[in-house]
Image (tube, rainbow, N blue to C red):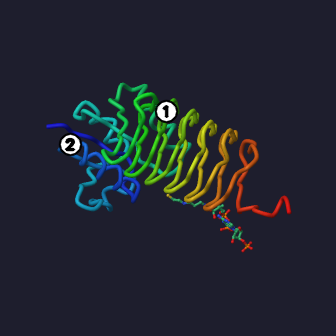
Amino acid sequence: MKKIAIYGAGGHGRVVADTASMLGWQEIVFYDEAWPQHQKNSIWSVVGNYENLLANLAQYDGVIIALGNCALRLEKTRELARLGAPIISLVHPKAFVSSISTIGQGSVVFAGAVINIEAKVGEASIINTGATVDHDCVIASGVHICPGANLSGGVEVGESSWVGVGSCVHQGIKIGANVMIGAGAVIVKDVPNGVTMISVAASQINS
Ligand SMILES: CC(C)(COP(=O)(O)OP(=O)(O)OC[C@H]1O[C@@H](n2cnc3c(N)ncnc32)[C@H](O)[C@@H]1OP(=O)(O)O)[C@@H](O)C(=O)NCCC(=O)NCCS
């Protein structure tokens, strides 16, 4: 029986578990710092905290970090990989991922997402429900492309950045590391490291 451990028993963790279930993982358990108060995440059990997960690593065929905090998700994924954990990536069967694209360990691609030809996604990244990452995009590690965000061709997104729900990024744009793109933003210029961007700046530019 294929066993997977998911660290992070919140809403995102539930989507990760549901995706794993669709992919045929038969035994799915959570670990979370809220254990033992938090015993259940939807239909799945929470069986311990991070320390317990470290002690039980040998029991699992797959391990994945499901924390919403981008930097922490990346840090924990790398730490567990160094300790020899079998870090996996998960691609929902209803996502489209080009065979000429790459996805790093610990990353998830949810239902309805599209990753087009020659796009690269690093480790511990989330390509969330219905997001699109078009041809030649380079998504670094620990990135979250939120539900319904659309990245045109050749966009680059730096480590631990967050591209908000329903946002839209013009082709060829470079977004730095540790950036927060707000919900619904339209990005038409490069974005430096560490900033938050909001709003849709559409205006008439010719008569
Ligand atoms: C941009 C964002 C990070 C700002 O969060 P924050 O720093 O806590 O900012 P606040 O909520 O205090 O808002 C500050 C101001 O910006 C405005 N604002 C916040 N987010 C905005 C957005 N996405 N677009 C336009 N305006 C926004 C607020 O209305 C507020 O305006 P006011 O000062 O006139 O009242 C956040 O609102 C956001 O959009 N996060 C992304 C959410 C997301 O993608 N979720 C997906 C989960 S899977």
Q: Nearer the viewer, mark 1 or mark 2?
A: 1
Q: Please give the name of the residue rendered at 26% of the width and 50% of the height, measured from the top-left corner.
A: 47
Quadrant containing the C terminus is bottom right
Q: Earlier in the sequence, mark 1 or mark 2?
A: 2
Is residue 43 or residue 45 the one in the foreground?
A: 43
Q: Say whether residue 189 is left or right of residue 47.
A: right
Residue 188 lies, in percent from the top left, at 73, 49
Query: What residue sits right under mark 2 in the picture?
Result: 24
- Tag 1's secondary structure? loop
Picture layout, residue 148 above or below residue 113: below
Query: What residue sits right under mark 1 in the picture?
Result: 117
Q: Amino acid at mark 1?
A: Ile
Is ligand 1 less than 8 Å from the beta carbon at label 2?
Answer: no
Is ligand 1 less than 8 Å from the beta carbon at label 1?
Answer: no
Q: Are marks 1 and 2 in contact (CB under 8 Å)?
A: no
Residue 129 lies, in percent from the top left, at 43, 54
Q: Please give the name of the residue rendered at 17% of the width and 44% of the height, measured from the top-left corner.
A: 26
Quadrant of the picture in which ligand 1 is shown: bottom right
Q: Say whether residue 24 is left or right of residue 157.
A: left
> Alpha-carbon distance for marks 1 and 2?
26 Å
Picture layout, residue 204 above or below residue 120: below
Q: Please give the name of the residue rendered at 26% of the width and 36% of the height, measured from the top-left corner.
A: 56
Is residue 40 or residue 195 the one in the foreground?
A: 195
Quadrant containing the N terminus is top left
- Marker count (numbered): 2
